[in-house]
Image: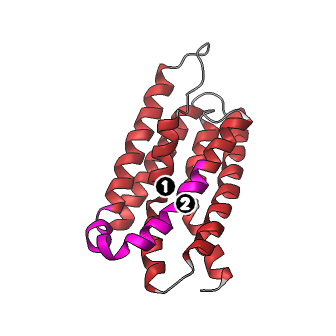
Amino acid sequence: MSIYLIVLTAIALSMDAFAVSISCGISNAAKSKKDQLILATTFALFQGIMPIIGYYLSNIFKIRIENLTSYIAFAILILIGIHMILEAIKITENCDLIELTPKKIILLAFATSIDAFATGISFSMINVSIFYAAIIIAFVTFVISFMGIKFGCKISKLFRKGSEVFGGLIIIVIGLKILIDSL
């Protein structure tokens, strides 16, 4: 597989992380530079590690997990989106911003990287150099996620009121898209 195809695959895999990153930026959950770097790095690590796991576990779990990945991602994203909306409704003008806890970050990273796991399975079937591909996928995801957070923060400044709810709705729509695509 050429580097161009791996980069295109990396871009495609990072689109869910990009959309969630925008959502986190819009909801002001990743307002500080530290939070932005942690979020983008976590997304990148999961997007880089999941294809490796899929690559090596492909023979064991291929048939069993293939049918469930979309449902798992859907459930996680729907729950996180609803939680974000409920938190946003509770927040008043004087309260703190929605907090992006380590648990939420890991769940978001996991949910957006399940397709990377499936990609690792397919990479094992066509003998792709998995570590080389994983590094490219992680790097591309980091850059795209970081840009998504920055973009979301800019949108948030324009539309302060309701941006937290909008961020939660974006995550729910991503979950629905994953479910619909699998059906």
- Against 10, residue 88 (above or below) is above
The residue beneath circle 2 is 47
Residue 16 covered by magenta stretch: no
In the image, 147: left or right of 19? right
Which amino acid does the dot numbered 1 rest on?
Thr
69 and 136: which is toward the camera = 136
Q: Which residues are magenta?
A: 42-68
Instruction: Give the image quarter of residue 136.
Output: bottom right
- Against 15, residue 42 (above or below) is above
Q: Which secondary structure lies at badge 1?
A: helix
Task: Say whether residue 11 is left or right of residue 62.
Answer: right
Residue 9 in the image, given as x and y percentages of width and height: 58, 73
The quadrant the C terminus occupies is bottom left
Q: Which residue is mark 1?
A: 112
In this rendering, which labeled residue sits more in front, label 2 or label 1? 2
Q: Position of residue 17 (x, y in %)?
A: 56, 54
Is residue 134 visible to us here? Answer: yes
In percent of width and height, residue 5 lies at 62, 81
Q: Give SS at disc 2.
A: helix
Q: Residue furthest top?
A: 94
**Mark 1 packing: few (<14 Cα in 10 Å), some, or many (20+)?**
many
Tell which residue pokes out farthest to the left in this image.
Answer: 64
Left or right relative to 106: residue 161: right
Which residue occupies 38% across, 40% down? Answer: 79
Which residue type carries mark 2? Gln
Give the numbered dot on residue 121: none
Q: Which residue corresponds to the image point at 68% horizontal and 41% vertical from the top-left?
A: 36
Task: Tell me if label 2 and label 1 are in contact, CB under 8 Å.
Answer: yes
Residue beneath the point at 48% across and 79% down: 123
Q: Residue at x 73, y 40 (%)?
A: 154
